[in-house]
Image: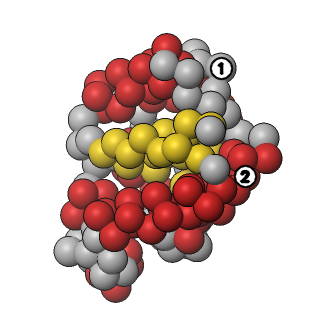
Amino acid sequence: MENILVINGPNLNRLGKREPKQYGIETLSDLEHSLKQSAEGLGISLDLFQSNYEGAIIDKLHWAEDNGVKGIVINAGALTHYSYAIRDAIAAIKIPVIEVHITNVHAREEFRHVSVIAPVTAGQIVGLGLQGYELALHALKKI
């Protein structure tokens, strides 16, 4: 069974409470439960991780390579737009990473249009709500 890591960054622990018109009413727990069910059907084992701290996310990326993780789904939240440290951590590992955003970041504020991590990921899924995570699992299964 393949092992996939799902990383959620800053403020994603507030899903369901934070700007529900933008992000929906489903919680992080709802998302994780749904992803576990989808992963089981795909023969994937999931590790789920959320942190509001850049360093913890970097440590988890390094941990993934050291522990045989086969793919990573990451929603780095606002860190997407300015964390060169997360970008460098992704570039430093040999695991395919798919960047996911719940909203269409390209249709929002201008500062959200640039992802500093996109150039070192296998792909990017934006604007498809929580379904984007499931699509990322399917994509990693094929990579």
In this picture, residue 92 sits left or right of residue 29 = right
Q: Residue furthest right?
A: 142
Residue 140 placement (x, y as % from top left): 69, 45
Residue at the (62%, 61%) spot, across then down = 41
Q: Residues within 10 Å of mark 1 (few under 14, many from 20)?
A: few
Question: Along the line of sight, which residue is nearer the eye, 141 or 14?
Answer: 141
Kindly identify which numbered label has been placed on residue 139: 2
Amino acid type at mark 2? Ala
Residue 13 placement (x, y as % from top left): 24, 57
Q: Is residue 83 above or below residue 93?
A: below
Question: Along the line of sight, which residue is nearer the eye, 112 or 52?
Answer: 52
Q: Quadrant of the C terminus?
A: top right
Q: Is residue 117 above or below residue 74?
A: above
Q: Residues within 10 Å of mark 2 (few under 14, many from 20)?
A: some
Residue at the (45%, 68%) spot, across then down = 34
Q: Is residue 104 visible?
A: no
Identify the mark nearer the N-term, 1 or 2. 1
Q: Is disc 1 placed on a helix, strand or loop?
A: loop
Amino acid type at mark 1? Lys
Q: Is residue 94 visible?
A: yes
Q: Quadrant of the N terminus?
A: top right
Residue 20 placement (x, y as % from top left): 29, 81
Label count reads: 2
Q: Label 2 near label 1: C-beta < 8 Å?
A: no
Question: Along the line of sight, which residue is nearer the eye, 39 or 63?
Answer: 39
Residue 83 placement (x, y as % from top left): 42, 33
Look at mark 1 in the image and give the residue it sits on. 94
Kindly identify which numbered label has been placed on residue 14: none
Residue at the (51%, 73%) spot, across then down = 129
Q: Is residue 78 above or below residue 105?
A: above
Residue at the (28%, 28%) spot, across then down = 56
